[in-house]
Amino acid sequence: MATTNRTALITGASAGIGSAFAHHLASEGYNLLLVARRAAKLKALADELTQHHGIRCDVFCADLNNSTAPAEIFSFVEKNRIEVDVLINSAGLSGKDAFAHTPWPTLAAEIQLMMTSLTELCHRALPGMQARGWGRIINVSSIAAFAPPGASLLYTGIKSYVLNISQALDMELKPQGIHVTALCPGFTHSEFHDAMGTRDQANKLPGILWQEADAVVREGWRAAMKGKPVCVPGVVNKIIAASVRPLPIALQYQIGNRMNPFKQE
């Protein structure tokens, strides 16, 4: 049965890190509001978590590529008298084609999903957290936020934004009992690369670089509860992040240009 009387809103909940967060928080007794585009997968996950953990689990189908989605989610929250104590912004994607050859609506959707919607959801969740004097926000960034930019990709720039805005919000909100954590995983076993059409490239990477979603979530949740503004899960990822940042900008440029495994010619 639910033991915390607290509720977590999780975006991208139908697969990958979002789904792993749903399982983990349900096991700790949190009620859930699961958000994703795929209704059938959301419903199946909600039924499973309710049956196994006795929690309340609401679902809301939304496409966060759409600028109206955050307001629609919180309209549902208000209508159903849900108090959002935890916000997990896990929804994400990455383009794989050259910037100049990608239609602008596709690029705009990527920015809307991982920057604008993420930021708006944080803003809409805060009044309730501030009123209760407690909240946890985890924004899923990436080890890419520490890495050199990749040719053609918006992804590294977007994830750098998520890293920076999470730290800025944590500085402001921690005195009010609200922790904001940027979770920066590396390569994680999930549907991400299948959805992006980069599975063949991903499969060529050494196994030591990969983590399971459950391990990422456990470390990320511990970090959030301890008030750490940044979490890079896994020893290998920590080493990579620490080694890249001190490099001169010109060298980072050359590394990013030559070593991006997903670069499109």
Image: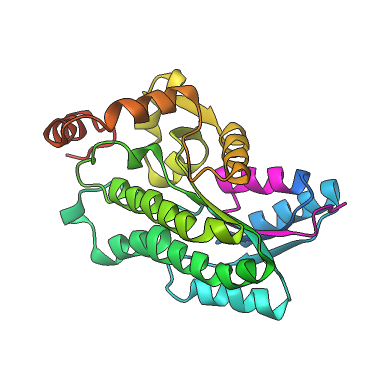
Q: Is residue 117 above or below residue 255?
A: below
Q: Which residues are magenta?
A: 1-25
Which quadrant of the structure image shows residue 236?
top left
Q: Which residue shows up at 81% across the image and 55% down it? A: 55
As drawn, which residue projects farthest toward the front? 175
Q: Which residue shows up at 84% across the image and 54% down it? A: 2
**x and y, in percent, of residue 208 in the image:** 45, 19
Q: Which residue shows up at 73% across the image and 76% down it? A: 80
Compared across the picture, whether 58 is left or right of 94 comes to right
Compared across the picture, whether 11 is left or right of 57 comes to left
**x and y, in percent, of residue 160 in the image:** 33, 48
User: Looking at this view, is 86 or 91 the one in front?
Assistant: 86
**Count of picture labels:** 0
Q: Which residue shows up at 75% across the image and 48% down it? A: 26
**x and y, in percent, of residue 89 in the image:** 52, 55
Based on the picture, tell me whether residue 197 belongs to the magenta stretch. no
Q: Is residue 108 above or below residue 187?
A: below
User: Looking at this view, is 262 or 180 the one in front?
Assistant: 180
Residue 16 visible? no
User: Looking at this view, is 140 or 182 the one in front?
Assistant: 182
Compared across the picture, whether 198 is left or right of 120 comes to left
Q: Is residue 106 above or below residue 157?
A: below
Compared across the picture, whether 250 is left or right of 233 comes to left
**x and y, in percent, of residue 35 in the image:** 60, 61
